[in-house]
Every structure is written in C-alpha cells, then in structure tokens.
Amino acid sequence: MEYTTIKKEDAEVSKILEAERVRQQEGIELIASENYVSVAVQEALGSIFTNKYSEGYSGKRYYAGNEFVDDVENLAISRAKELFGAEHVNVQPLSGSPANAAVYFATVKPGDKILGLKLDHGGHLSHGHPVNFSGMLYDFVQYTVKKETGEIDMDEVREIALREKPKMILAGFSAYSRNMDWKRFKEIADEVGAITFADIAHIAGLIAGKQIESPVPYFDIVTTTTHKTLRGPRGAMIMCKEKFAKDIDRAVFPGMQGGPHDNNTAAKAIAFGEALKPEFQAYAKQVILNAKAMADELMKNGFKIISDGTDNHLMVVDLSNQGLVGKEAEVALDKAGISTSRSTIPYDINPPMNPSGIRLGTPAVTTRGMKEAEMRQIAQWIIEALKNKDDDNKLEAIRQEVKSLCAKYPIPTF
Ligand code: DSN
C-alpha cells in the first residue's frame, strides 16, 4: 500500500496508517461485524465528494451545486432497491444507531411500547438497552432466547406481544446465529396492530447474496449498516414501504441529521453495485459455509456454541466450560494474531465488560479468500491459544503461523 501523499505530507499519520495496514494484513479478523472493502469503495471514500454539503434530498437541496450528488445518491438508491426489492430507500443515515433512532423518531412517540430482543440474548444497544437513548426514551419490553436451545421462541414472542400490545415489534440482532422467522414476526405484529421493524445490520450481505431469507417483503421498515457482511463503507440505510417513506425521510433530515456524507454515498453506490454481481452470492454462500466449518471444529473439540451451531456468519462461544471468561480469551487470541470480541451469553452470570463468551464471525476471512480448511485450522489455533493463554511464547508462535497463512491472502488496499 502506498498512501504516497500522506507519507510525504504527514509522517505521524502515515506511520500510524502503516501500522494499521500491517495489523490488518498479518492478523486474522474474526470480529463478526467487520470486513474488508474493495479498493473501489476505498477510493470513493477518499474522493472529492467529501468536499460537498447537500442537506435535503435529490432535486430539493439547501445548497447549490448538487447535480452530481443527486446523481450518485439516486444511483445508490436504485441499486439498493434492486438488491433488496425495497419500495423506498434512504441512504443518508450515518450509521446503524442513527438509522434506528430515525425509525423510532418517524413512527412512535417517546414512552410508546416497543418489543425487541434483549442485549445479552443477542440484541443491540439501540434495541432498548437502558443505557442507550432507545431504552431511555421508549418503553421497551424484551424477548429472550430459550435457556435450553439458545433460540428465540416465537410462541413466547406472541405471548408477550398479546400481553403488552407494543406499537412496534423489532426483529434483529448483533449476536444471534439462527435464522429469524420474519413471516411469523409479521403475523404476530398484525395480530396486535404493531409496526414491523427489522434491523438486518449483521446479515444484510447474506440477504443481498441470496443465502438468507429477507424481511423486506414482510416488514414495514428495515434498517441495515452497510459495512458488515454487506461489505460497503461505514454507514447505514433505511428501507421501507412507500407509506412510511415521507416520515422516514423527514426523520433522517431534517429530524436527526444535517448534511449527508456524499463520499460515503458514492462508496455505498459502488458497494451495492458489487453486491449485485453473481460473485457476491458465492461470497455470501462461502461466509456461511466457513462459519459452519469453524463452529463444527470448535464443537468437536468440546467448545459450546450457543444454539449448537450457526445459520449465518457468526457464532457465540460459551467459554464457561473451559474455565475462561471473554476478556481473557479476547486478550490471549489478540496476542496470537486473532481478533475477536468478547460477548455476553444468554443468562450470563458475568458482567458485560467481562462476559462469559466470545463472538466469532467469518465475513472478513471469507473476503480474503479463505475456505473451510482454513477455518478448521483457525479453530485449532483458537483452541491452542486458549489452552496456553498465559504462555506468551506459545501465543507468539501461533501469531507467526497466523502471519504465514495471512501472507497468502492479501487484504484489498490501494
Ligand atoms: N458494533 C456492532 C457489532 O459489533 O455487532 C453492532 O453495532
């Protein structure tokens, strides 16, 4: 990689950037929400669209000179519509939580009741956690996964919905490895007259790649970040039925945000274009095959995966039968060149800063071209690193093996 101008103009930033490049190239990235974007997406992010202000929407901006911003935003919207079959798309949300905030802002009032998945059962902070704006402003009631199966029990969701009569039912997750029953969620919402809202941030790429069923045909509103399995720039978008379009657009601007980040919109257009290509379906399929292979290898070696496997790109490993907690596992694996995130497990007895599990995901390693054999090898390194968590020499030896494997799978950079 050569960020030649940065190198010439700013040695301090250049040094940090190069260190990060080496970290990304030489390590194995298993954080389930991360990925590597294409060079085209990187170029768009660094493009002159970053110079522009463009509050408003296509044809109705509050600044002059937006004819090409209109072109690129319209292109991103039409590609997103084609990719997901959505009636209406807003590509301006800056990230996932602001997108979710705009949805609440557009559709419910502070104090209204919303039903969402509990954070330590796989939900997201913006799905009603008390420390988040969502939990502070709205009256969230939460559904959970079953202790015995690790899966959402739709009969229980219905029971809570009938009892609580929420204004909105939210289906989505950050750490759940099973398919969602979108149709059933919609049926339950219809029974109680609730708006349906799906947050597909984690699985949008698997849906776009036609490997997982989409909530878009069933749900009123669907949000997603664009940088996880979807493999675009950091950001988000909102898809909705036409009848919510005006309210959603107004909630994003002027309700929640000022000027959109047009360089990011250009990068979204490119990423959606990439996701429309047949090779993206092959990538999405491989992401899931890789996750299944990794989960299988870990389970064969005595590790407990919540729900005993995965249908998507991620898995939550319960470390309690290994005599370990998430933080020490994360630190040991990091020393071995394997990047993961600690994770709560359902019914966790440990605190969120040091929970009982780790979450692993395969989008980034799949983008590099790794397949099932590499997943099994990585699982073996994980097992070895965790067994030797206090032996820095052993962890360094694994790190060198990791580095050799990674050398065969370069990350996309300029
Ligand atoms: N931070 C993301 C994740 O890791 O799942 C969710 O916002």
Image: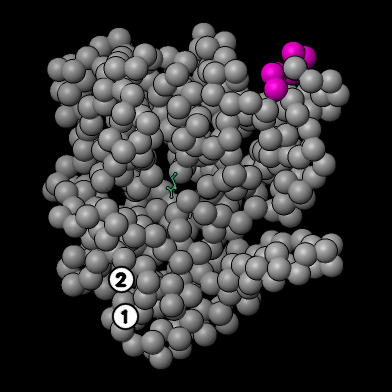
Q: Residue, x 65% and y 68% (percent of image)?
A: 16
Q: Residue, x 68% and y 28% (percent of image)?
A: 259
Quadrant of the image containing the C terminus = bottom right
Q: What residue type is labelled 1?
A: Lys
Whether residue 317 is visible to the viewer of this picture, yes or no, is no
Q: Is mark 2 within 8 Å of ligand 1?
A: no
Say whether marks 2 and 1 touch (CB < 8 Å): yes
Quadrant of the image containing the N terminus = bottom right
Q: Residue, x 25% and y 44% (percent of image)?
A: 121
* Residue 304 at x, y percent in the picture: 23, 62
Find residue 126 and report its image quarter.
top left
Name the element at disc 1. Answer: loop
Left or right: 408 as drawn, with respect to 136: right
The magenta span reads 55-61
Q: Residues within 10 Å of mark 1 (few under 14, many from 20)?
A: many
* Residue 373 at x, y percent in the picture: 47, 71
Report the front residue among 119 and 299.
119
Find residue 172 and report its image quarter.
top left
Q: Which mark is residue 389?
A: 1
Farthest bottom residue in view: 393
Up-down relation of residue 137 to residue 231 (above or below):
above
Q: Residues within 10 Å of mark 2 (few under 14, many from 20)?
A: some
Q: Residue 328 carries which label?
A: 2
* Residue 223 at x, y percent in the picture: 49, 30
* Residue 314 at x, y percent in the picture: 40, 53
Report the front residue among 346 and 146.
346
